[in-house]
Image: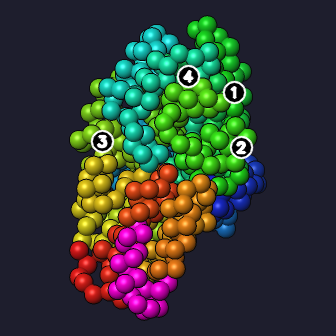
Amino acid sequence: MSVRVYIPRDSGALSMGAESVADAIAAEARRRRLDIEIVRNGSRGLYWLEPMVEVATPSGRVAYGPVAAKDVASLFDSGFLTGGKHKLAVGPTDEIPYLKRQERLTFARVGIIDPLSLDDYVEHGGYRGLERALALSGAQVVEEVTASGLRGRGGAGFPAGIKWKTTLETEAKQKYVVCNADEGDSGTFADRMLMEGDPFVLIEGMTIAGLAVGATRGYIYLRSEYPHALRTLKAAIAAANASNYLGENVRGSGKTFRIDVRVGAGAYICGEETAMLESLEGKRGMVRYKPPVPAIAGLFGAPTVVNNVVTLATIPIVVEKGGSFYKDFGMGRSRGTSPFQLAGNLKYPGLVEKAFGVTLRELVYDFGGGTASGRPVRAVQVGGPLGSYFPEAKLDVAMDYEAIAAEGGILGHGGIVVFDDTVDLARMARYAMEFCALESCGKCTPCRIGSTRGMELIDQIIADRDRAASAALLRELCDTMTNASLCALGGLTPLPVMSALKHFPGDFGLSGEPT
């Protein structure tokens, strides 16, 4: 009987040599005439251990990592196919504290199944949500989503149920479901992990959305930097079509739903939903005026549900288990779980799915292990390149939409980037303005011109040219960008700048104590 060996084909693992490890393990098994079955799974999200190799034993899966090709012969010598001891042994995968302390709902199968095996997906609970959805009316499905309290995980945190209800109640001959997979925030990789590690859960979520609101077509708008996700999604969509989970008469329901993938061209602004819709229509990616909102007039002017990958991938468990089950997780108006992505200067970077309410300090220290450099944590940016910088003294804030907002920040896509005490926050603030200037679609003046003037003002402050007056003018400029920009790119760029000024004035050469 063959032994099953799991080796990730996740992009992060591949970047660390997973392909050469897989080749080496296959070659060594042949040389020793051992019968093994290699399964290319997704990553568990413990990126400091990648490539992490797992072996299926009678008592469960046992992990080893990080494994290099040169380690393979010694792994075989130590009897790793039966869970033998080795310097790279991590122990039973399910007992790894980093994983054991999580609440994995959306990411329950990621790293466990073969991403391209529909049978494996179904065997691990896949398509139960669709099965239940087909037994309900569209309005009943929308009610479950509303009752769950699920909010958009792409950054805005808008209630998914309200979007769906609006599209459902808008009369039209054609409706669409669009998945925003243009994951462009620094320090974020949850969407990619899902698409590469459990693509069927996204397909199932989109199918439920389409059948619920009366849409017959779905599009995944994928960022161009994700070629591995593209191949995985295309293969999974083909498998779903072949098994009647997509196409005409889905599972005998009499309803049609099809999904296509469209690849962007590298513009950050296309992560904004209306710019993404413009790009999907073959136009330049520029922000649209709202209203009308996409739920009423979206793709090609038709009612369109627009959600990001994590939101749609959460739908199957919400519908299968019921809205009340999902709502039991979280706090306040932030219900359920969220994937928090730990990056930057950390000992243990990776993905942590926890219920809302976990503190930033817990994520940075209990999961992340503090800085990789061993130096003190000085700043943590939450919410991508447009997110605020939190000083060490503010890390007890709860990861909750409203709690983060009360501290002048945004939760965004759940990206967390850690910096030690060598960081210069004045230069990081300048980078925020530079990023906005480079990525602006140019449609509105506050964003297009304000970001360039912002860079100039920060340069003047750093160079000590009329520092106090330049700082006052920078604050006024940020106020204008916040209140007059057409979309979140210009509207949120002041957050990292103002938080750096507030908490780290010394980096700008300004007087005042950090708060």
Q: CA distance from mark 1 to mark 4?
A: 19 Å
Front tag of 2 and 1: 2
The label number, if any, that marks residue 334 in the structure image? 3
Tell whether label 4 touches label 1 (CB within 8 Å): no
Front tag of 4 and 2: 2
- 78 on left or right of 20: left
> What kind of residue is marked 4?
Gly
> What kind of residue is marked 1?
Ala
Q: Secondary structure at mark 2?
A: loop
> What kind of residue is marked 2?
Lys
The label number, if any, that marks residue 239 in the structure image? 1
Q: Which residue is mark 4?
A: 210
Q: Which residue is mark 2?
A: 283
| Circle count | 4
Q: Secondary structure at mark 4?
A: helix
Magenta stretch: helix, strand or loop mostly:
helix
